[in-house]
Amino acid sequence: MEHAAGSAPSAGGMAGNGEQAAVIEFLSQPGAYPHAAGSVSRIGTHAALVFLAGDRAYKLKRAVKFPYLDFSTLELRRATLCRELEVNSPATPELYLSVLPVTRGGSGFELGGSGEAVEWVLAMRRFGQDALLDTIASEGRLNREHAASLAHTIEHFHRHAPRAGNAAFGQHFQQTVANIKDALCGPAAQAKGLYLHGYIERLWRELEARMPLIGEREREGFVRRCHGDLHLKNIVLWEGRPRLFDAIEFDESLATIDVLYDLAFLLMDLWHRGLKREANTVLNHYFQSAAISELVGLALLPLFMSVRAAIRTMTGLDALAFQDAAAQERSLKEIESYAGLANQLLNPGEPVLVAIGGISGTGKTTVAREAAPFIGAAPGALHLRTDVERKVMQGAALGEPLPQEAYGAEARDEAYRRVFKKAEVALDAGYSAIVDAVFPEDGFRASLRELAQGAGVAFRGYWLEADAAVIRERIAARKAGAADASDADIAVAEAQMKAVKPPEDWIRIDASGTPESAAAAVVGKFGGQPPSEGAPGALR
C-alpha cells in the first residue's frame, strides 16, 4: 500500500505486542480456520499481513504506528478494518465479506469465537495471485485490452465517486510533499546513499507553480473520495474484468484527492515497469470521452506522477525494517529506481503537435496508437480522433453507427473544431497531442498548423498511403471485427480516393505494411525509439 510519509516505526511502534505475535502464529496454522484450509501462506507489508487459507483470505493490521497511520491499539485496528470493508464493498462486493474477531478462551485462540476479542481480521474471498495485474504484468501478459478495460473501470469509478466539499486537498498535498522532504532528505535515506536535495527543491517549485490549478480543480469538483492506492497490486482480474480492491481506509485525507492524483499512481506504476504502451492506453481511454475542461488537469500529471514515485521511494525505505539482508539488497535497487523516476518525471520536455491523416482504411488510428507512447512526456501523447469526437457529440456508444445527417458539413466541422481545441488544451498543459483524421481539405490542415504556431510548439504532419486493395481489405476486416468508432465503409473510402489530395508539405508514409513499421517511421522522425513488431504489450 502507498502512504504519505516514510520513517521507521516509532518506539513501541510494534506496541511491544507479544500477543499479536501469538495471534499471527495461530493464524498461520491450518487448524485456526472453521473451513478446510490446507496449507496457510502469508503475504506481508509494513502495515498488514494477509493469511491465505483455502478459499478465503484474512487480513490483519500490524500493531504499528507511523507518522501517517496508527494501528497501535486493538480498537484502532478494528475500526480500520471495518472502514476498509465499508470503503471497498461498493466497488467489489464479491470479494469483501466481513470483519471477524480473534477471540481468546479456555482452549486458546478462536477465529470468530464468542470470547474476549484480542485481534480482528478482515475476511475476503481468495483469488489466485496469477489474477493480480501485478503478476500478469510481471509475466508479460498485460496487454492493451486489459489497459483499456482498466481505464474505463477507473473512469466510471471516478465519475460516480462522491465529490468532497472543503476537502482542502491542496493543503494536504502540500503536507505530503513536506513529508517527502523530511523522509528523502533525512538520515535514513542518506544512510542508504540517497541524496535527493536537488529533486526536492525542484519538486517544491513545481508544487508552488501548480497550486492555483490544484485549487481550481477542487472548486470544480474534481476532488472526490477516490481509491488512494491505485496500483497493479491492488487490481485483480475477476471474472474477466479488472476490479479495484484495497482502497485506503485509515486516513480520509489520503483518499479524498484529485481524481488525476488517483490515476497518476497507476500511470507511474506502468511507466516504472516499462509498460509505456499500456500506460498510454490507460491515459487515452480514460480521457476518451472527457470534456474539454477536464483536459486542463493534464498540467498536473508530471507533478502527481513524480510525487507517487517519491512516495514509493519512502515506503520502500519503511519496508526495509521488515526484510532480511538479501531482500533489502533487492529493495534498495527498486528504491533507487523510483527515486530516479521521480526526478525524471519533472522533466517533461517540449510538447509537439502531430497530425496523422489519410484515406479511411490506411491505418491512421492504429499507427497513431502505436506511436503515441513514444512521443512527448510520460505517459506519451494524447491521441485524439475525429471519429471518437463525433460519437461523443451525439451521445452515442463508440461502436454505434450514426445516421447520415451526423456526417453533414456542419457536424464534421464541429468535430474537427472540438478535437483541435482539445489538442490546444493538451499542448498548453505541456503534453504532446496526435490528431488522427482524414483531413480532407486544406483548411483543416492549415488550422492545425496555425494552432501549433499559436501554442509555440513544433508541428509534424504525416500522410499515410496504401494501395486501394489494402484499404478495401482493411475496411472489410474492420466491419467484420470488433466495434470501432469509424463508420466509414468501402464506398466512403473509394469516394475519398477520388476527392482527397495529399498535402504537399506533409511527410508521406507507406502504410501498406504493418502498423508497427509505419509507426516506427513516425517516431523515428522525433529521434525516439520506434515501436517494434511483436513487442511486449502489442495489441493481441
Image: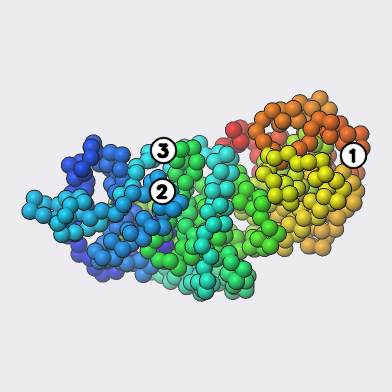
453 with respect to 301 (left or right)? right
Depth check, mark 2 against mark 3: the one in front is 2
Looking at marks 2 and 1 on the same chain, the residue that comes earlier in the sequence is marked by 2
Q: Residue at x 60, y 71 (%)?
A: 219
The one of 535 and 236 positioned closer to us in this rendering? 236
Quadrant position of the N terminus in the picture: bottom left
Quarter assignment of residue 367: top right
Residue 479 higher or lower than 252, as above or below: above
Quarter assignment of residue 40: top left
- Residue 57, horizontal then vertical, whole percent: 31, 45
Find disc 3 in the rendering and name its residue. 130
The disc placed on residue 93 is 2
The disc placed on residue 500 is 1
103 with respect to 158 (left or right)? left
The one of 55 and 441 positioned closer to us in this rendering? 55
The one of 352 and 441 positioned closer to us in this rendering? 441
